[in-house]
Amino acid sequence: MPLNALGAVQAERAAKYLAQLSPAAIWSSDLSRASATAHVLARLTGLDVHYDKDLRERHGGEWEGLTIDEIRDRYPGDLARWDPPGGESVEAVAERTCAALLRVAEAADPDSLVVVVGHGASLTWGMSRLLGLDERVTGGLGNCCWCLLSRRGEGGRWRLLEYNVGALPEPVEVAELGDEA
């Protein structure tokens, strides 16, 4: 499923901000919306997008292709546990996404900024695993929002410096105080 109009605007806004930070690399899930979002940043930076299938969103099993209302009607107990029948477990998603984030970090030059584009649940769970946190501490990521993680030295502890940050809307002109509208 491609980005909708709102998603395209969000991707453009985030990419304009992130491009100003001069990222050294862009990594992405190979799924369509994440890939399209990554390509907006790639267009602005001239960087290639590298793909890792382990950055994909959780496989939803029998929930795949259903709306939240359909899931609520058909699978109320599973929804309450957030456990899709035939889908990936939170543990499995956290493990594979954390492993992907570690591979990306290992491939990066020290002190460089790398942008990873993925999906809210898998990135939340993977980062939580990387940081040694319970994912309920942070909550889910918003669309086109980002986090800043850092590690001091090779093999050092990971630190969460920013979480769920989004680009501000385009600036608007504001009348000077005292000006008549």
Image: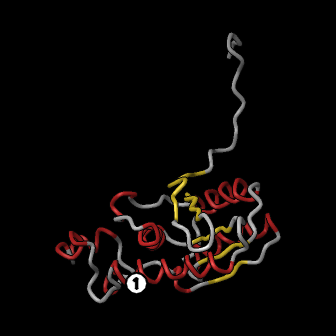
Q: Nearer the viewer, residue 111 or 55?
A: 111
Q: Position of residue 55 (x, y in %)?
A: 53, 79
Q: Residue at x 35, y 57 (%)?
A: 137
Give the quarter of the image for residue 146. Answer: bottom right
Give the quarter of the image for residue 89. Answer: bottom left
Q: Residue at x 70, y 53 (%)?
A: 17
Q: Position of residue 141 (x, y in %)?
A: 46, 60
Q: Nearer the viewer, residue 84 or 133?
A: 133
Q: Element at badge 1?
A: loop
Q: Position of residue 129 (x, y in %)?
A: 42, 72
Q: Residue furthest right?
A: 46
Q: Position of residue 58 (x, y in %)?
A: 41, 80
Q: Residue furthest bottom?
A: 86
Residue 60 in the figure: left or right of residue 47: left
Residue type at mark 1 is His
Q: Which residue is mark 1?
A: 59
Q: Nearer the viewer, residue 71 or 54?
A: 54
Vertical relation: 54 (above or below) 14? below
Residue 142 in the figure: left or right of residue 115: left
Q: Residue at x 69, y 35 (%)?
A: 172
Q: Residue at x 71, y 64 (%)?
A: 111
- Quadrant showing the C terminus: top right
Residue 47 in the figure: left or right of residue 8: right
- Quadrant showing the N terminus: bottom right
Give the quarter of the image for residue 176. Answer: top right
Vertical relation: 162 (above or below) 60? above
Residue 178 in the figure: left or right of residue 150: right
Q: Residue furthest top?
A: 178
Crowding near pointer 1: few (<14 within 10 Å), some, many (20+)?
A: some
